[in-house]
Amino acid sequence: MFKTTAQLKGFFFDRKAVMDATTKAERRVLSKKGAFLRKAFRNALRRRKKTSSPGQYPHVHSNDKYATLKNILYAYNPSRHSVYVGPVRLNTKHNVPQLLTHGGTVHKRNGKTIHIRKRKMIKDKYEEVQDKLTSMWKDTIG
């Protein structure tokens, strides 16, 4: 997993290090998989005023272009020769994407404690669209 967005940018598919580490066909397929999964997950996130139910995809409450769960990037993962897809962690005290993925507890400044139960995230969307992603590989093997 990438710790910062700057670190992640070094593994975008147009970077020289990624181009040297992969074949053109592998880059094309992994890039398409990443783009497809990012779009599928973005489409699952709805803008709502209320919070989502546990086990459902999280609702997005921000209209900001960058400070939102819909700010999702994908990049080459060299250790697994695969693609990493995930929401960008904002510069906040709490890692919101991780809290939504695994659940957790947040202590607010006013002394209140909020318990967050896990929501569906990228892994769940991947499982939903896995058959379609697998068919992308079939077309490249000739």
Image: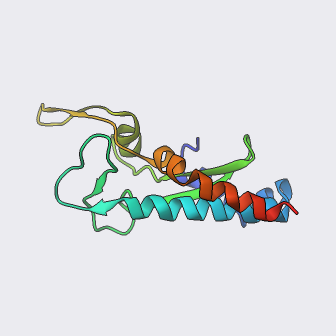
Residue 47 falls in which quadrant of the image? bottom left
Quadrant containing the N terminus is top right
Residue 26 horizontal/vertical position (percent): 79, 59
Can you see residue 15? no
Residue 44 falls in which quadrant of the image? bottom left
Quadrant containing the C terminus is bottom right
For this rendering, which residue is in front, 134 or 1? 134
Left or right: residue 73 versus residue 142 is: left
Can you see residue 34? yes
What colour scheme was applied to this rendering of the protein?
rainbow
Please report the residue visible at 34 percent of the width from the left and 46 percent of the height from the top: 92
The residue sitting at the right extreme is 142
Left or right: residue 51 versus residue 126 is: left
Residue 117 horizontal/vertical position (percent): 28, 35
Q: Is residue 87 above or below residue 101?
A: below
For this rendering, which residue is in front, 38 or 55? 55
Residue 20 horizontal/vertical position (percent): 85, 58
Left or right: residue 42 versus residue 77 is: left
Please report the residue visible at 39 percent of the width from the left and 50 percent of the height from the top: 91
Residue 127 horizontal/vertical position (percent): 53, 46
Please report the residue visible at 50 percent of the width from the left and 44 percent of the height from the top: 123
Please report the residue visible at 22 percent of the width from the left and 61 percent of the height from the top: 48
Q: Is residue 12 above or below residue 100?
A: below
